[in-house]
Image (cartoon, rainbow, N blue to C red):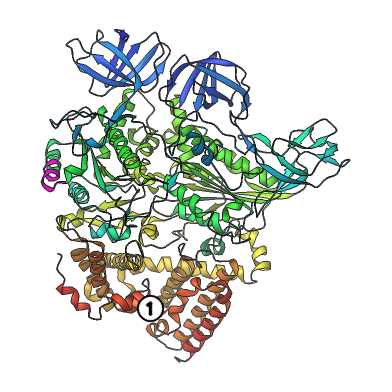
Amino acid sequence: MSKATEPNTESEGVIESVSGPVVTAVDLEAPMNDVVYVGHEGLMGEVIEIEGNVTTIQVYEETSGVSPGEPVESTGAPLSVDLGPGMLDSIYDGVQRPLDELQEKMDSAFLDRGVDAPGIDLEATWEFTPTVEVGDAVGNTDIVGTVPETESIDHKVMVPPDSLPEGETAEITAVESGRFTVEETVAELETGDEIQMRQQWPVRQARPTVDKQTPTEPLTSGQRILDGLFPLAKGGTAAIPGPFGSGKTVAQQSLAKFADADIVVYIGCGERGNEMTEVIDDFPELPDPQTGNALMARTCLIANTSNMPVAARESCVYTGITIAEFYRDMGYDVALMADSTSRWAEAMREISSRLEEMPGEEGYPAYLAARLSEFYERAGYFENINGTEGSVSVIGAVSPPGGDFSEPVTQNTLRIVKTFWALDSDLAERRHFPAINWNESYSLYRDQLDPWFVENVAENWPEQRQWAIDVLDEEAELQEIVQLVGKDALPEDQQLTLEVARFLKEAWLQQNALDDVDQDCPPWKTHQILGVIKSFHDEAFDALDAGVPVDEITGIDAVPRLNRTGTVPDDEASAFIEELETDITEQLRSLY
Amino acid sequence: MKEYKTITEISGPLVFVETDEPIGYDELVEIETPNGETRRGQVLDSSSDHVAIQTFEGTSGIDRNSSVRFLGETMKMPVTEDLLGRVLDGSGDPIDDGPEIVPEERRDIVGAAINPYAREYPEEFIQTGISAIDGMNTLVRGQKLPIFSGSGLPHNDIALQIARQATVPEESDDGDEDSEFAVIFGAMGITAEEANEFMDDFERTGALERSVVFMNLADDPAVERTVTPRLALTTAEYLAFDKGYQVLVILTDMTNYCEALREIGAAREEVPGRRGYPGYMYTDLASLYERAGRIKGLKGSVTQIPILTMPSDDITHPIPDLTGYITEGQIMVDRDLNSQGIQPPVDVLPSLSRLMDDGIGEGLTRADHGDVADQLFAAYAEGEDLRDLVNIVGREALSDRDNRFLDFADRFEETFIQQGYGTDRDIEDTLSAGWELLSMLPTEELNRVDEEFIEQYYHEDGERVEATADD
């Protein structure tokens, strides 16, 4: 939605008062959630409350200098996004204005006010190839043709989901191939409807589908601890809460880079400017691990940094998920990262307190839980109306104040999401990354995903994982004793368990996000590394039973190589691990 | 200009006035008291028939007959290169008896956000001459790295040491002469005594020449504190992005700034957030901290070191907590180290510089820097853990390996962290000090350092550490 594409405004009101991002106007005829333009500069805003003749508006731009008496215009449409080819490889602010274009239009490195730009380029032309013929019957969201949007992704042009009455079809009366702009008609229906590549959809409303299904396929992440212990399903929801400095953003970025999704929508919601710049600089350079093309070719970035207007921060998660749903409708698996949902909740709180609403817990509005669950419910594995299947997986970072997970945003999020990756500042302080605490985290998808892992990776996947969990559990208990009496006071078998747990942590759970190889670990490698640690464990306990002291067991030449397995390139890894396994067995057996 | 004598209510720092024309949000206001004094303020809330004004200098002396003038513009900072070497008060007026400042331009103090697309990612090393920072939590140009401290801790000494010593090492640059440094010092609510210390030090060391000082003292109006950092940052942006300076902004003490925010919030009867601080404090702090950075195609940079004292050393208090979520790391000043006499008492374990990894290494500092820092972290963390254990079981009960790490931790504090406020260590000195320490450990324990570096820098004889003085 942008003024550039919606020149016709309908009703006019007058500003009555201004207080930060909240403006009230009188005599404005606009329904709830309609977009309005405020003041002489035409600042974009949204109606959030109507009381008698007074309409309250949240403004998506800085309001310094705006005075009562200035006009307010209504557009007669709710906050919407432009959907069409060109969204990938783009970087938007919270209301889908392309940041690169804003910089050009403002001719400044700083964000000015009242400048607008359409979400997708209206001038660019795209090569349209029809997939239907004249006479074919099509229904809502049916695909009528494709456009090569980027080198990685074919954009499917669909009938808008609200063009025909539900369940009905209409015949195509005209369809053309060739190069078109997003506003030119590429097909016509017998009803007279014209289909363009560009659609609009209100951000606060989920795009319709037929059915939500139980996800059975994992969204593999390239992160050993996630795939190995706490997997996320395609269409699943996950939360990453953690205090500052515990690596939330690095974890989110790793997921954005290595998750096996077709499309990634990355929302930087109220976070640091320099971090967004890192993403903007890095993603075009990095190869997509699946296609080898630039990562940006499958990515849409939404950046609303912490100093950008607070109301746009509130809307940016909706902008993001609507874009995600659009690609889902095409049959793609979409992963959406929101960093951080706490900033979104805080934006709600800020607006709510300006409206002088009765606060709920810790000043958050009483509807916090409802908004969070509404948002996460838009994730899922869906059967689309056009018969394709697609998914939206949502991974939300949470920034609990003081690292205290009992605060409202974390708690309300945990009630909804099924995967919980708890970041831990103690681990981060030890430079154990990813600093995900294996004792506190959980995934409720484990059981429903096991069949996939068994079929596609290894038959003993579930058993081996359970073994790792058992060792780590035992280690946690033993550590409590060690804290009291020291390690040397433990019996030898327990000391050996601690050593094995150390390898689990160092060689398997830890992963170096800065190492070119180690940063992305495919599931088979995750499984093999765990496998070699397990065989070390089995052989080591045999040796211990035969009377070999722990020092000698852990002192064998092959052991230091365990910690290096993660950095061995994928094509050599199998051989390396196999050789390591043989060496461990031989060296341990030679001790007794 | 129209004058109003229609004040309806005065409460704390706020004045409510009835008006008959529209007044812009954030607009500047002058209020003249019956005895002729002029107070300044800013519109906080504006509706068609009345406005709420936040006064910078307090409301005492203002009565319902005072006259109110609306200046028709938002607050501006007069900027010019001549500001360097000057001392201003918290509202930007000179207090050093120097010549009048002729501004080149007047800039809105509510800076616009930098378009993330136009930012340049920070990756150039700033040498502070402090090992705990350069070696372990490296600062880079365009970063915002706060110092988290507590009452009674020497954060001011650290700030002064940084202000004095900060440089951009020549060899890390591409040779051009663009590394001119400027320091902007924004003091909010510091005591007159502290202010004198700062000024004496600035004058004595000649640092004043390259500095602009903004002073809001403890007995200056609290509301003015909400303006001081914005004046400082507006000046910083001008010097950096228009004049090409590498600007370091030191803001002290952010805790006082947040208290002022809370005071205004309470006076406006806003719904309070955690501990009475306003719900928009995150956004407000972000609008300051995010003004650090670099811009593509421009020479200069704005680097920020905000200082805050954590109430009762509590890092989960809303002020350090929200700050930590916005800034790119933090430097922690530690009470125990301070009582041991370590100068500067920086605890490196909870400290962090998020931008460090991109700012160090070959061509920037030295190729082994990352590995050395990692290894020092790991070994010191292990030593720290063992200290808890020693308290329970005693040193004798520990293995040789554990004892070695305990010694390492002690030595690390005594020779690496400890350096004195007067010592400027360049990055080579810092890394050599690091290697002296690592040489206390057997090479097998150095699992985070590349073998090539071990060969190059490791001393076989760990005892040599004894000989190194903390120069």
Q: Quadrant of the C terminus of chain B?
A: bottom left
A350 part of magenta stretch: no
As drawn, is B359 to the left or to the right of A468? left
Query: Looking at the picture, how far across and down is residue B147, in whole percent?
Result: 27, 48
Q: Is residue A380 above or below residue A352?
A: below
Q: Disc 1: which chain?
A: A
Q: Quadrant of the N terminus of chain B?
A: top left
Query: Looking at the picture, how far across and down is residue B146, in whole percent?
Result: 30, 47
Query: Looking at the picture, how far across and down is residue B456, in whole percent?
Result: 31, 77
Q: Is residue A231 above or below residue A162?
A: below
Q: Is residue A526 above or below residue B267?
A: below
B201 part of magenta stretch: yes
Q: Residue at x 50, y 75 (%)?
A: A533
Identify which residue, A475 or B68, lies in the foreground: B68
Asked whether residue A272 appears in the rendered view, the answer is no
Residue farthest to the right?
A135
Give the residue type at disc 1.
Answer: Pro
Query: Looking at the picture, how far across and down is residue B342, in whole percent?
Result: 17, 58
Disc 1 residue crowd, few under 14, some 14–19, many 20+, Cα 10 Å? few
Residue farthest to the front?
B176
As drawn, is A370 to the left or to the right of A398? right
Question: Start and end of the magenta stretch?
Answer: B199-206
Which residue lies under the disc numbered 1? A491
Asked whether residue A116 appears in the rendered view, the answer is yes
Q: Residue at x 45, y 27 (%)?
A: A21
Helix, strand, or loop for circle 1?
A: loop
Query: What's the magenta bit mostly, secondary-structure-wise?
Result: helix
Identify which residue, B228 or B94, lies in the foreground: B94
